[in-house]
Amino acid sequence: MVEHQIKARGIKNDMVLEAVRRIPRHLFVPSESLDSAYSDKPLPIGHGQTISQPYMVAVMTEALELEGGEKVLEVGTGSGYQAAVLAEIAGRVVTTERVSELAEEARRKLRDLGYTNIEVIVTDGSAGFPERAPYDGIIVTAGAPEIPRVLVDQLADGGRLVIPVGNSYQQTLTRLRRSGEEHVTERLEGCVFVPLIGEHGWAEHGEGDRR
């Protein structure tokens, strides 16, 4: 998976590649999807959510430009797989999930795997989690109609925010860097994520009805 689906497609960061190598992805997918656990595609995990394809997990992690020891916020815990990848590099990961059943399952898996630097919180992640701010990096694993200002405000000076931005069917992976009150935004590549539901994302019942 790492050699042919991730490294061969341009991921160069050794810390990211090694983090993905170390994590047993099959432990984060439902039993009916075990045969596809290491395929380069997203997989359903229930509640209308997915575990992202391995390549996209690596792309987003590399885009955060982590060097080790940082504090990172993840919006959208899902299966917990992305949080585990982040925790292999970052010093502390705060991850939010609005579906309590997914949060509890991810919390259990991460605990069983021995991660002590991940905090799973049930909340509306579109608003971030200001109680632990500022963050050196923020990663959003759901598509937003625009970059939520509330997330930008929770970045440390020099921090990076990686988020898919677009409509509910297709987005562009976008990286924002904060430098004081200035922000520089880069468009990275096209992607497709489930919608970011919440006060600063899409309304629960569809794209046409923003909160």
Image (cartoon, rainbow, N blue to C red):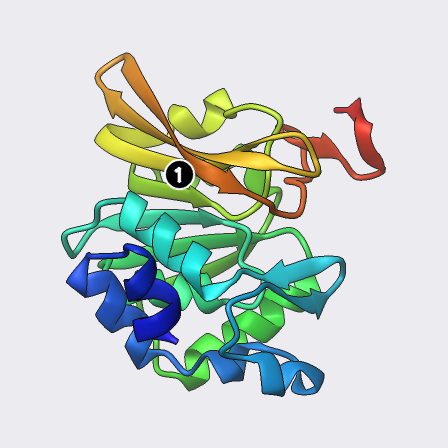
Is the C terminus in the top left, top right, bottom left or bottom right quadrant?
Answer: top right
Q: Residue at x 76, y 61 (%)?
A: 47
Residue placed most toward the observer, 14 or 103 = 14
Is residue 88 left or right of 165 when viewed as pictured?
A: left
**Residue 111 vertical placement versus 56 (above, below):** below
Quadrant in the picture for residue 155: top left
Q: Mark 1 points at which residue?
A: 162
Q: Which residue is drawn at 61% across and 87% down?
A: 35
Quadrant in the picture for residue 161: top left
Secondary structure type for disc 1: strand
Is the N terminus in the top left, top right, bottom left or bottom right quadrant?
Answer: bottom left
Give how far across and how far down residue 111 sits, in percent. Answer: 43, 79
Give how far across and how far down residue 65 sits, in percent. Answer: 22, 45
Residue placed most toward the observer, 149 or 208 = 208
Quadrant in the picture for residue 57: bottom left
Q: Residue at x 27, y 70 (%)?
A: 19
Give how far across and how far down residue 100 sits, in percent. Answer: 67, 61
Give how far across and how far down residue 82 sits, in percent. Answer: 44, 62
Q: Which residue is drawn at 24% across and 57% down?
A: 90
For label 1, the crowd category at 10 Å Cα-Cα, with few meaning under 14, some 14 to 19 and many 20 or more, is many
Q: Is residue 59 visible?
A: yes
Disc 1 marks which amino acid?
Val
